[in-house]
Image (cartoon, rainbow, N blue to C red):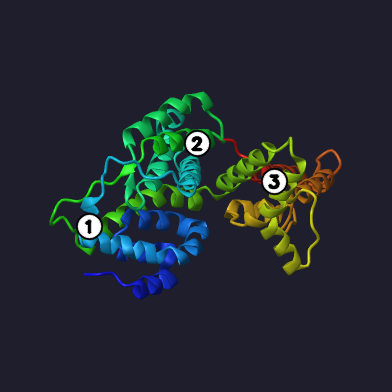
């Protein structure tokens, strides 16, 4: 059955970031990529407004089996957009792995390169093209030990894998006659792939929020440090990345803090445990208290309740309680290393 441009546009408008129009057109790799990146981080979804007629034409061409006439031995043209997409998605997959899977054994040698390679290959398989998965993964495994332990290792691994994938690009071979698949099994496979990608990330975010946010902060800081030789470019990137925080300051009426990165994390990290809430009560602090507020309150209370200066019989017990509370809050505000 021929695909409709109008239907594709309707699905693009209603659920484009989730890849509904690609599911309709039989572009499952593209649909999965959009599900995992919310429409190519929004940019790809907007760009597709002018690409949908071409996608519909390709889908109808395949339905009519005209694609068999194309010589599959001829290399597809090089696409800068595809190459950039491979690099960014490879970095994205690697970052997700760093957040959710970094506790696994041989992470930097096996798990991380395989995740980066999977992201690069997913972009390679979009549309009527594909690439050599084995050679792409081999390149990732060879490149990974060179940058072992670095939080920025997904970048060079993804670059190397993207070059390999582009070098071995080819047309996707035509499907055998009668191989059209039903929608149910396709949705099932897409759901399993989405679950495999999101489950480790979701677990890490919900059960280790503090460490996750600190890690993201460290990654952004390391990324900005790469532009030390171009201070103006570094300032531009920092301004863009801190835009949500600046908007928050405008909405709440608060001033802009010099230590913006740390303050932004303090705003985000509100999920105090009961033990931490009790520690705040002991030190007479509010939830919004910063590390400086905690330290100042601790020093004042420790001086007041120190047994050498306070003759009260409860002074020693209170002094111990104050020290324990300070230790709990200090551990919370101390950056965690991966």
Which residue is pictured at 78% across the width and 51% down the height? 293
Q: Which residue is mark 3?
A: 321
Query: Looking at the picture, does residue 265 appear above or below residue 131?
Result: below
Image quadrant occupied by the N terminus? bottom left
Cα–Cα span, label 3 and label 1:
78 Å
Q: Secondary structure at mark 3?
A: helix
Res 271 visible: yes
Earlier sequence position, callout 2 versus callout 3: 2
Graded by Cα atoms within 10 Å as few (under 14), some (14 to 19) or many (20 or more), the crowding at tag 1 reads: few
From the top left corner, tell me how far across and down residue 305 is, in percent.
80, 46
Q: Can you tell which of label 2 and label 1 is closer to the viewer?
A: 1
Tell whether 208 sits left or right of 173: right
From the top left corner, tell me how far across and down residue 23 is, in percent.
32, 63
From the top left corner, tell me how far across and down residue 329 is, in percent.
67, 46
Res 20 visible: no
* Circles 2 and 1: CB atoms closer than 8 Å: no
Q: Which residue is mark 1?
A: 66
Graded by Cα atoms within 10 Å as few (under 14), some (14 to 19) or many (20 or more), the crowding at tag 3 reads: some
**Quarter of the rendering containing residue 333:** top right
Tell whether 201 sits left or right of 328: left
**Quarter of the rendering containing residue 271:** bottom right
Q: Which residue is mark 2?
A: 159
Q: Nearer the viewer, residue 328 or 1?
A: 1
């Amino acid at each position: 059955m021929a695909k409709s441009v109008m239907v594709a546009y309707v699905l693009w408008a209603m659920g484009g970031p989730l890849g509904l129009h690609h599911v309709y057109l039989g572009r499952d790799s593209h649909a999965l990529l959009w599900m995992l990146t919310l429409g190519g981080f929004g940019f790809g979804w907007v760009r597709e407004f002018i690409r949908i007629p071409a996608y519909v034409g390709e889908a109808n061409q395949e339905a009519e089996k005209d694609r068999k006439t194309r010589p599959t031995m001829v290399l597809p043209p090089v696409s800068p957009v595809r190459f950039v997409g491979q690099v960014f998605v490879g970095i994205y997959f690697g970052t997700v792995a760093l957040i959710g899977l970094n506790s696994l054994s041989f992470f930097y040698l096996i798990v991380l390169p395989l995740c980066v390679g999977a992201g690069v290959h997913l972009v390679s398989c979009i549309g009527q093209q594909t690439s050599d998965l084995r050679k792409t993964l081999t390149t990732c495994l060879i490149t990974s030990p060179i940058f072992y332990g670095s939080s920025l290792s997904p970048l060079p691994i993804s670059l190397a894998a993207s070059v390999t994938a582009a070098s071995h690009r080819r047309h996707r071979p035509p499907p055998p006659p009668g191989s059209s698949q039903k929608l149910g099994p396709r949705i099932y496979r897409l759901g399993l792939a989405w679950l495999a990608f999101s489950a480790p990330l979701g677990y890490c975010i919900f059960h280790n929020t503090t460490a996750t946010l600190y890690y993201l902060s460290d990654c952004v800081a390391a990324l900005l440090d790469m532009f030390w030789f171009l201070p103006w470019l570094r300032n531009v990137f920092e301004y863009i990345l801190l835009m949500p925080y600046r908007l928050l300051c405008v909405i709440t009426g608060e001033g802009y803090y010099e230590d913006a990165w740390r303050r932004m994390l303090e705003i985000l990290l509100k999920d105090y445990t009961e033990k931490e809430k009790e520690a705040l009560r002991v030190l007479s602090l509010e939830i919004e208290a910063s590390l400086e507020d905690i330290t100042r309150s601790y020093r004042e209370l420790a001086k007041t309740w120190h047994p050498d200066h306070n003759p009260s019989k409860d002074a020693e017990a209170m002094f111990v309680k104050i020290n324990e509370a300070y230790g709990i809050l200090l551990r919370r505000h101390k950056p965690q290393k991966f």
